[in-house]
Image (cartoon, rainbow, N blue to C red):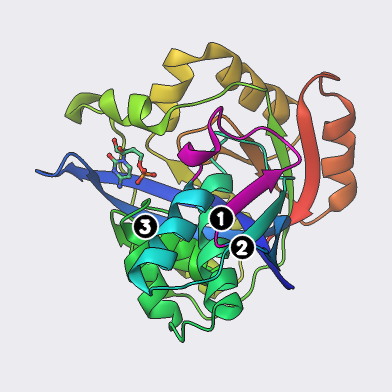
Amino acid sequence: MVKEKAYAKINLFLNVVAKRFDGFHDLEMVMASLELHDVLEFRKNTTDEIVVISDLEITKDVKDNLVYQIAMFLKDEFEVKEGVIININKNIPIAAGLAGGSADAAATFRGLNKFWKLNLTHDDMAKLGLEFGSDIPFCIYNKLCIAKGRGEELVFLKTKLKIPVLLVNPNILISTKEVFKQVKSDNIIEKKMSDMTNAIFNKNFELISRELHNSLEEITFKLNPEIRKLKNHLIDTGLKGVLMSGSGSTVFAIENKKNKLQYSLGTLRDDYYKIITKIR
Ligand code: C5P
């Protein structure tokens, strides 16, 4: 049996730079991997079939799940004769801006690479992964980095932040595609990314909190005012470094003093998903 952890991510910084001819957008991001993770297990199947089992329904039809699609792709591409049973233990909220789906997809590459002895490098898997989603290359490595292009041009920052993070998800499912559709040159605020990367290099927590930025926030907030309210509520409870992750709907807060996060968590609605985790 092979076991792989699929780590959630947050974007400490996200600029939308330009719309591209292929329908995607060029981005400038700082991406951080979290301790929060799903667990994928890969076991021998007695037949040559691919079976995907999850403790939570991810897609109505399992064939729409990236985990299934990537397993099929690898089996075909590398002419694997055996089947596999993949068990997904889901902890990361779905369609929440935490790359839960991409993390599972990347863990499928890493897991089947070991299980079927495919001898792929991380770079090989990142390249293949991009065909299935923009966040998958990052999720292959799970290291603090700058990401450009669609999100696949990665420059690792070679430092670890290990800052406690509160994640709050108001149970709103966000379609990344729908959010990007609303991007216009007049509704995008850009910020200088070097101020954030300098703050990270200097491990200046105050400055990191101040330089948090996400160009997609305003768009998602307009579509879902409840998410803006949630961000404002967290700020009202005394937290300073508060930002929406990716295209939403998760709002996160970074804070060195964990008890401050615990206090804010206690003020939140019971039906919201909330957890304190850490940047890895
Ligand atoms: O790559 P992924 O499947 O995660 O992207 C979902 C959608 O988000 C894309 O179909 C595209 O509309 C949008 N997107 C984008 N630019 C990116 C990443 C995603 O426009 N860099």
Q: Which residue is drawn at 51% across and 62% down?
A: 106
- Numbered badge on residue 50: 1
Q: Can the viewer see residue 55? A: yes
- Label 1 vs 2, first from the N-terminus: 1
- Image quadrant in which you'd find residue 57: top right
Would you identify the image quadrant in which residue 121 lies?
bottom left
* Residue 83 vertical placement versus 16 (above, below): below
| Amino acid under disc 3 | Met
Instruction: Classify mark 3: residues with Cα within 10 Å, few (<14), some (14-19) or many (20+).
Output: some
Circle 1: element type: strand
Q: Nearer the viewer, mark 3 or mark 2?
A: 2
Q: Verify whether residue 102 appears in magenta.
A: no
Q: What element carries label 2?
A: strand
Q: Are marks 1 and 2 in contact (CB under 8 Å)?
A: yes
Q: Is residue 168 left or right of residue 60?
A: right
Q: Residue at x 63, y 74 (%)?
A: 160
Magenta stretch bounds: 48-65
Q: Where is residue 186 in the image (x, y as percent from the top left)?
A: 20, 25
Q: How far apart are marks 3 and 2 (CA)?
A: 43 Å
What amino acid does circle 2 point to? Val
- The answer to which of 161 and 81 lies nearer the viewer is 81
Viewer-closest of 126 and 236: 126
- Do the numbered discs 3 and 1 sit on residues whose CB atoms are within 8 Å? no
Q: State the mark number for residue 84.
A: 2
- CA gap, disc 1 and disc 2: 5 Å
**x then y, percent, for residue 248:** 52, 32
Q: Which residue lies furthest to the front in this view?
A: 47
Numbered mark located on residue 193 in the image: 3
